[in-house]
Image (tube, rainbow, N blue to C red):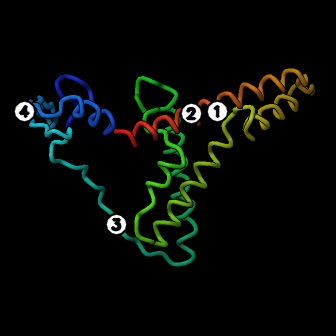
């Protein structure tokens, strides 16, 4: 596993792409872990910022389920997907991780779909998008359902409705947060298209 080029940490693939693009046409020192050893390896970067390697694809195991086995397996996969997505949202909240660079708009979503039609992949991506939108909608941001749930819980606990002025201000703040997220997503997509 490569963890730095020329002393610059590369925790994510986007980090590696940026570092290598800035070192195009040169030789860089890659620090990699193999087993328990740390190796320093000189690597030639071509004029396009590539080093001639690709990501290792995870092993795919196909399992067949009966109708009764499919329901709990689907629920388990949905739970794993939700927990992974919530973990990823946590990474977005910490700028030091650089995870914000992976946020994308409908342009990035469109690029996820394969160029040839495949019902299985289409339905999997559709399910993932539905789960992601559901989790996003439950975030305690005032303009989303999660914010309304938060205010309802507040009202149930205190037995007082928040003032209309407070609700309007929090709705505006929520909309500003959502618009900021949309600007970040479009900005990232445009930057990726330009580079």
Q: Secondary structure at mark 1?
A: helix
Q: Earlier in the sequence, mark 4 or mark 3?
A: 4
Disc 2 packing (10 Å; few <14; some 14–19; many ≥20):
some
For residue 173, say whether it is visible: yes
Residue hosting label 2: 183
Could you tell me which residue is drawn at 51 percent across and 58 percent down?
77
Q: Secondary structure at mark 4?
A: strand
Question: Which mark is nearer the camera, 4 or 2?
Answer: 2
Comparing labels 1 and 3, the label whose residue is closer to the camera: 1
Is the N terminus in the top left, top right, bottom left or bottom right quadrant? top left
- Residue tagged 3: 61
| Residue 174: image location, x then y, percent | 71, 29
Dividing the picture into quadrants, the one containing residue 35 is: top left
Is there a contact, CB below 8 Å, between mark 1 and mark 3?
A: no
How dense is the environment of label 4, judged by Cα within 10 Å: few (below 14), some, or many (20 and up)?
Answer: few
Q: Position of residue 40 (x, y in %)?
A: 9, 30
**CA distance for labels 2 and 1:** 6 Å
Q: Which residue is mark 4?
A: 42
Residue 22 left/right relative to 84:
left
Q: Is residue 27 left or right of residue 118?
A: left
Q: Which residue is mark 1?
A: 179
- Please, what secondary structure does the residue beneath circle 3 have? loop
**Left or right placement of residue 157 versus residue 88 in this view:** right
Quarter of the image with the C terminus is: top left
Question: Crowding near pointer 3: few (<14 within 10 Å), some, many (20+)?
Answer: few
Label 1, label 4: how many angstroms apart (C-alpha)? 44 Å
User: Where is residue 24 shown, x and y percent of the image?
Assistant: 17, 33
């Amino acid at each position: 596993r490569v963890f730095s080029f020329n002393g610059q940490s590369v925790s994510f693939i986007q980090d590696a792409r940026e570092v290598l693009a800035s070192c195009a046409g040169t030789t860089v020192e890659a620090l990699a872990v193999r087993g328990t050893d740390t190796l320093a390896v000189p690597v030639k970067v071509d004029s396009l910022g590539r080093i001639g390697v690709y990501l290792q694809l995870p092993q795919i195991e196909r399992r067949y389920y009966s109708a009764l086995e499919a329901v709990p397996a689907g629920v388990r996969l949905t739970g794993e997907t939700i927990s992974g997505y919530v973990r990823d949202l946590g990474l977005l909240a910490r700028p030091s991780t650089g995870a914000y660079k992976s946020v994308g708009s409908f342009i990035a979503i469109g690029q996820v779909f394969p160029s040839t039609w495949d019902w299985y992949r289409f339905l999997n991506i559709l399910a993932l998008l539905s789960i992601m939108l559901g989790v996003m909608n439950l975030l305690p941001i005032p303009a989303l359902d999660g914010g309304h749930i938060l205010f309802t819980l507040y009202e149930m606990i205190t037995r007082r409705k928040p003032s209309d002025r407070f609700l309007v201000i929090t709705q505006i703040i929520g909309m500003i947060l959502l618009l900021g997220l949309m600007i970040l997503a479009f900005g990232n997509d445009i930057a990726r298209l330009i580079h």
